Amino acid sequence: MNQAYVDASWHERPDGSGVGGWGLVLLLPGELPTRYQGQLDAPDNNAAELRAVLEAVRHAPVGEPLTVYTDNEAVIASVGRGRGPHLLADLAREALDETQAREVALRVEYVPRTRRHMLSAHELANDARRGLNTPATAGPHADVLIEQRPAVPEARVSLRRHGERVTALVNLDPLSDVPPSAQALLAAVTLARAGEVLLVRRASKIAQALWQRPERALLPAAHAQLAQARQAADGLGVQVQFQQTP
C-alpha cells in the first residue's frame, strides 16, 4: 500500500496575508521514503494542509491506492468525508478532482504528530514556510538506525538505501577515548557513499554533540579522531542529519 504523511505550517504576515509551507513523506513498497516540500500563499493553516494532500496525490503512482495520514481533523472531514468547513470546499474539490484524474483510490486517516514520518513532514513544512530547503531532500539519502544497549560492548547499525540494505555489528572499545555511542555513529558514517545524506535515528545526544562539534571532546585523542572522521565525511560530501525518534 502506498502511504503519505503530510503536514503544514502557516504564519500571518504583518500586512495580514498568510504564508504557508507543506511537507510530505511518501512511502512506496520496497523503496526508501521520499520527501517533498513547498511554500505557498495561504489564508490559513488548513489551506496549507489541504495543499499537502494535493501534492501527495500528485506524487503518488497513477492508478494505485493511496492512504494519506494527517493530524488535521478539518482535512479528514473535507477530503475523507466530504463534509468539512465551507471555506475549504474548493480546495478539497481540487484534491478530489486530482485523485479522479490520476485514478488514485484515496483514503485519509488520522495519526498523531508524534509518529516518526509525521515529525519529518512537520520539519519539511516548517522549513518550506521559512524559505529553506531541508538538506535531506536535495540528493541521494540513506536511512540509518543505531541500536545500542547500556553495558553491552556491541552496537547494531542498519542502513537502508534504494535497492540495498546493510547491517553491521560494531564492537565498541571500552578503553577508547571516544565514547561508545560516538564509536557507533562513526561506524555508521563509514557506510555512506560519496554525496549521500544519512538520516540517522537513535544516535545518543552525546554522539550528536560530538559529531556536530568535535572540539567538545574532553580528551585530545578523541577530539582528533572525531575531527578526522568529520573531515573525511565532508571531503566526500556526506551529510549527517539526526532524526527525532518519539
Image (cartoon, rainbow, N blue to C red):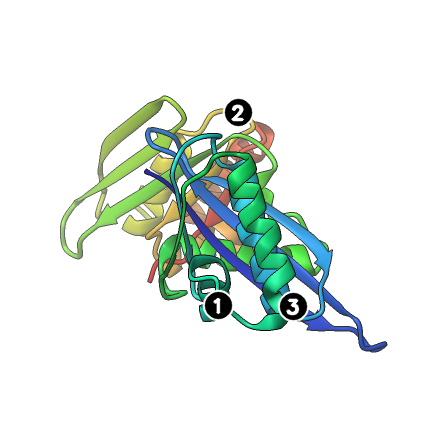
Give me the C-alpha separation between circle 1 and circle 2. 49 Å
Q: Is residue 163 among the parts visible in the rendering? A: yes
Measured along the vertical axis of the image, is residue 230 above or below residue 11?
A: above
- Circle 3 sits on which residue? 10
Measured along the vertical axis of the image, is residue 4 above or below residue 8?
A: above
Q: Position of residue 14 (x, y in %)?
A: 82, 78
* Secondary-structure class at tag 3: strand
Q: Is residue 239 among the parts visible in the rendering? A: no
User: Looking at the figure, which quarter contains the C terminus?
Assistant: bottom left
- Left/right of residue 35 with respect to residue 45 in the rendered view: left
* Secondary-structure class at tag 2: loop
- Circle 2 sits on which residue? 194
- Left/right of residue 123 with respect to residue 127 in the rendered view: left
Q: Residue furthest top?
A: 163
Q: Position of residue 44 (x, y in %)?
A: 66, 71
Measured along the vertical axis of the image, is residue 8 above or below residue 33?
A: below
Residue at (56% x, 36% y) in the render: 101
Q: Residue furthest left?
A: 152
Asked if the residue at tag 3 contacts the one at tag 1, i.e. Cβ–Cβ closer than 8 Å, the answer is no
Give me the C-alpha separation between circle 1 and circle 3. 23 Å
Name the N-terminal-most of marks 1 and 3: 3
- Decide which of 139, 110 is in the foreground and name it: 110
| In front: label 1 or label 3 | 1
Where residue 39 is drawn, which disc sits there? none
| In front: label 3 or label 2 | 3
- Decide which of 25, 71 is in the foreground and name it: 71
Near mark 2 (Cα within 10 A), the count class, few <14, some 14-19 or many ≥20, is some
Name the N-terminal-most of marks 1 and 2: 1
Q: Position of residue 172 (x, y in %)?
A: 23, 42
